[in-house]
Image (cartoon, rainbow, N blue to C red):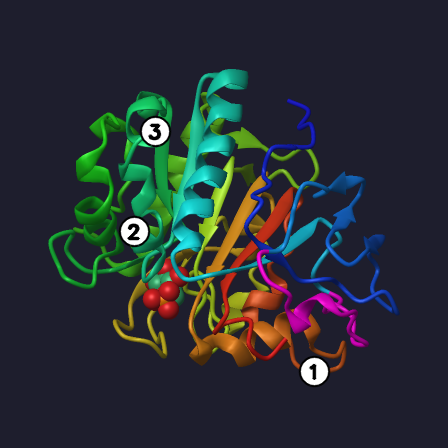
Amino acid sequence: MIQTPFRSLTNPTQVLLPPSSSSSSPSSLRFSSTLFSFRGFSLSSVTPKHKSPLLSPLKSSMAESQKSNAVVEVFEKEELPVSLAKYVADVSNKFTTERGAFTVCLSGGSLISYLRKLLEPPYVDSLEWSKWHVFWVDERVVPKTHEDSNYKLAYDGLLSKVPIPAGNVYAINDALSAEGAAEDYETCLRQLVKNGVIASSSVTGFPKFDLMLLGMGPDGHVASLFPGHPLLKENKKWVTFIKDSPKPPPERITFTFPVINSSAYTALVVTGAGKSDAVHSALRGSQNSPKLPVAMVSPEGELKWFLDKGAASKL
Ligand SMILES: O=C1O[C@H](COP(=O)(O)O)[C@@H](O)[C@H](O)[C@H]1O
C-alpha cells in the first residue's frame, strides 16, 4: 500500500516549535513566524494562541537523527489530550477506511491518561473500534493483573471502556519468561503480517504499524530501550527482551528500533519539566553529543511530538 501524506492534523490552538533555518540538519524545512512545513506538508492553518519565545528562529539545528518529517507542537496542559485524541482519531479513520483495519501500538506510563479524550464524544461513538488491533511497544514481564503491567494500565484506562474485540488485543503471554515472551510476541506479529493484519514496510521489511504511540522517560528512554544499553543496536529481531532494566521492573520485552522506525505514523507524547533536558537533547542537541534513545526515533512515516510547556521549557 502506498501511504499518501496525511493532511488533516492541524489544530488552531497550538504553538509550533520552529526547526532551525541555519543548518547542518539534513532536513528540508521552511519556517515562518507561524508555520513550518516538512516535505511540502504545510501546517498553514495553525495560529498560535500566544506568542512564545519558541517562535523565534533558533541557531541550533534539530538533532541529526530526527528526520525532516517531524512536527513538534507545544500545548497548554488541557489541550494536549484534546489534540492527541483528534490525531489518533484521524489516523484511525484513515486506515479503517483505506484498508479496513487499524494497527496501533501503545506504550505504558503516562501515555494512557493522555488518551482519555478518546473516551468522550465524538470519538467514543464514532471511531470504528471493531477494526482496531492493539499492540504494546513494550511490556513488563509481570502477570497481566499486576500493577506494573502496561496491559493492565491500558485495559483499566482505555480498552475496557471501548468495544475493541478481545481477539484484537495482543497482550504478551505472561506465563513465559522474558525471552520466551519476546519470541512468542514476535511469532504472533509475523503471523499477523503474513495474514495482512499488520502491513509490512517495503523499505525495511519490518512490520509497519499504522500508529506508534510513544512515551519517553526523563532519561530519554522510549519503549524499554534505555540509554547506553546494547539493545539500542538490535537490528534483526522485531521484539527483544531486557532483564536489567534500570527502571523497575527489571524484566521487560520491547519492540526494537527497526520496528519502531518502520511505522506509518508516530506520536511522541512527552510532558513535564523533568523531561525537558532529554527533549532538548533530542531536538536541539549537537550532532556530537551521545544519542539518547528518543533521538533514535526516526520513522519512515511521520513523527509528531506532543509536548507540554514543561517538557518544551529548555528548547
Ligand atoms: O517504563 C516505561 O516508561 C516509559 C515512559 O513512561 P512515563 O510514565 O514517563 O511516560 C513508557 O513509555 C514505557 O512504555 C514504559 O514501559
| Label drawn at residue 289 | 1
Res 41 quadrant in image:
top right
The boundaries of the magenta stretch are 49-64
- Above-or-below relation of 128 to 81: above
Closer to the chain start, of discs 1 and 2, is 2
Q: Quadrant of ligand 1?
A: bottom left
Q: Is residue 284 left or right of residue 57?
A: left
| Residue 270, image x, y percentages | 46, 64
Density class for disc 1 (Cα within 10 Å; few <14, some 14-19, many ≥20) is: few
Amino acid at pointer 2: Ala
| Label drawn at residue 77 | none
Whether residue 241 can be seen here: no
C-alpha gap between disc 1 and disc 2: 34 Å
Q: Under tag 2, what secondary structure?
A: helix
| Residue 53, image x, y percentages | 67, 73
- The residue at 47%/74% (across/down) is 310
C-alpha gap between disc 2 and disc 3: 37 Å
Nearer the observer, 293 or 22: 22
Nearer the observer, 50 or 282: 50
Nearer the observer, 255 or 121: 121
| Residue 100, image x, y percentages | 45, 17
Density class for disc 2 (Cα within 10 Å; few <14, some 14-19, many ≥20) is: many
Which residue is labeled 2 in the image? 181
| Label drawn at residue 122 | 3
C-alpha gap between disc 3 and disc 1: 44 Å
Q: Residue furthest left?
A: 145
Closer to the chain start, of discs 3 and 1, is 3
